Amino acid sequence: MTLITMESRPEPEAALAAWARSLPPDFVWGVSTSAYQIEGAAARDGRGPSIWDLRCRVPGGVANGDTGDVACDHYHRYAEDIALMRTIGVAAYRFSVSWPRLLPRGRGAINPAGLDFYDRVIDATLEAGIEPWLCLYHWDLPQALQDLGGWAHRDCAGWYADYAALCARRYGDRVRRWITFNEFSVFTLFGYAIPWAAPGIVDRTQHLRAIHHVNLAHGAGVDVLRALVPHASIGAIHNRQCVIAEGGRAENQAAAALLDEHWNLAFPDPQLRGHYPPQVAAAIEPHVQAGDMARICRPVDWIGLNHYGPIFAKADPTTTWGYGWGAAPPDSPTYDIGWAVFPDAFRDELLELTRRYRVPIFVTENGCGGSDSPDGSGRVADPHRVRYLSLYIEAMRAAMNAGADVHGYFVWSLLDNFEWGSGYGPRFGLVHVDFATQRRTLKDSAFWYSALIGNRQG
C-alpha cells in the first residue's frame, strides 16, 4: 500500500481548496463502491448466484468475457481497502450489501457467513473513523428470484422488504445512513428494455412492471427502515443527466423527451412527488393498483445524485420505446474513455434537483474512467481524472453558491473494479488495482483529492 506524500503530486487550485476547507464540518467527503464490482468470492462461504453471475456467462454479455468472480478480492482485502480510505482522509464510505451473499436464494435460509462479512466491514470502517453508508441494492438480484420473474413480478417488492428488514435488524445498531437503491433507471432500462445489463430482457411490459415494482420496493424499504432503525437517515440514489436531442433535430426531440421521463423522472417523481411523469404514467397505469402511489411516496431524508455527463438521444424505431443513444457533438470535450465532459450540466442538475424535490442532496457518484497504468517508477498519473474532478467540483461549488442544497460528495470509485458490461477495461478508481496481483497503488487523483479535503497524512 502506498502512503500519501504530496511531493511532485498535483495540487488543487488554491481557491477551490480554500472553499472546500470553508465548508461546514458536517459536509461529507467520501468514496463509493458496490458489492459485485469489488468483492469477488462469488462462490465462497455460501453466497448464491446473482443475475450478474449469469450475465457474465452469456457470450458477448460482458467485454472480454470478464466476470466478477474475483474482481478486487475485497472480500478478503477489505481491511487494506479501508486503510486506503483512511490514508486518503475521507469521512464516509458508501458501499452496497450483496443480497445473494446474505440470502443465497433471495429469501428463506440466511447465510451466517455473509452476515458476518458485513459486520467486519462495518466495524472496521467505524474503527477507522469513517462513517458507513449502506446501500441495500446495487443491481445484484439473486438469480433464484429472477427465476421467479425478478422485478417484473410484483412479489419482488415484498421479497426486497424482507431482505431490508434482515439488514436493518443486523446492522441498524451501527449504521445510520441507509440507501434503498442505486440508480433505479439504469438497471431497469438496461435490464428490461435495452439488453446492456442483467437480466438482459427486452420486453416493454416487463420493463413497465419492473419500474413500478422497484418503486413499490423502495417505499416498502423506507417503511421497514423507519420501523427498525429509529435513528436512520434514509435516501435513494438516482442517476440523472439532462437528455439532449442528437444534433438538435426535431425528429429526435420526442425520443429525448421520452428518454428523459424514463431516465430522470420515472423514479424520483413518484417517490418524492407522488405521481409518474405523463408518458410513463399513461403506459404504466394498467400495472398500478389502488393505494400503490401512497406506498411509493414515502418521506426520505435526502436524495443521492449520480452524474457523469449529459445523454444524447435519437429516434430509433427498432428499439422497444423508439429511442436510442445518440452522439455528442463532434467538437465536445471528452475524457480518456470518450465520455463527454460538461460540468455546466452537473451544476444545472444540482439546481434542478433542489428546485424540483426540495430535499437535501448528496452527490453519491461522480468520476472519470480511463486506461490508467503505473509508469516505470510505479506512479499512476491520471491527469484526465484530476482535471475532471476539478471541473466538476468547481461546478458543484457554483451550484451551491446559486442555492443548490448539497451536503456531500462521493467520488466513484475508491478502486478500479468490474465495470459491468465493460468488464475491466475502463478504470474509475482513485486507487489502481493490478487485477493479476491485487496490488493497490494510489493514483495522482487520490493525492489530489486528499489535498482538496484537507488531509496531509504521511
Image (cartoon, rainbow, N blue to C red):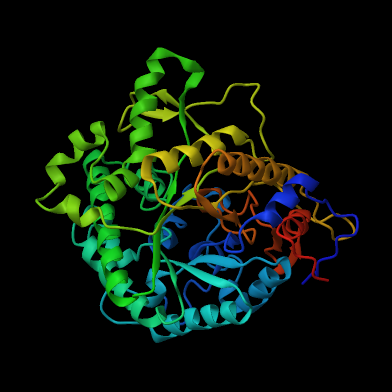
- Name the side, left or right, on which 235 lies relative to 17: left
Q: Residue at x 48, y 21 (%)?
A: 246
Between 158 and 72, the one lying in front of the other is 158
| Image position of 420 with respect to 404: above or below | below
Residue 32 falls in which quadrant of the image?
bottom right
Between 196 and 275, the one lying in front of the other is 275
Left/right of residue 108 with respect to residue 439 in the rendered view: left
Q: Is residue 9 above or below residue 319?
A: below
Q: How many marks?
A: 0
Question: Quadrant where the N terminus lies?
Answer: bottom right
Q: In this image, 430 relative to 328: left or right?
A: right
- Give residue 40's position: percent from left, percent from top: 54, 70
**Residue 408 location (% of width, % of height):** 56, 56
Q: In front: 56, or 105?
A: 105
Q: Residue at x 63, y 61 (%)?
A: 414
Percent position (x, y) of residue 341?
Answer: 63, 34
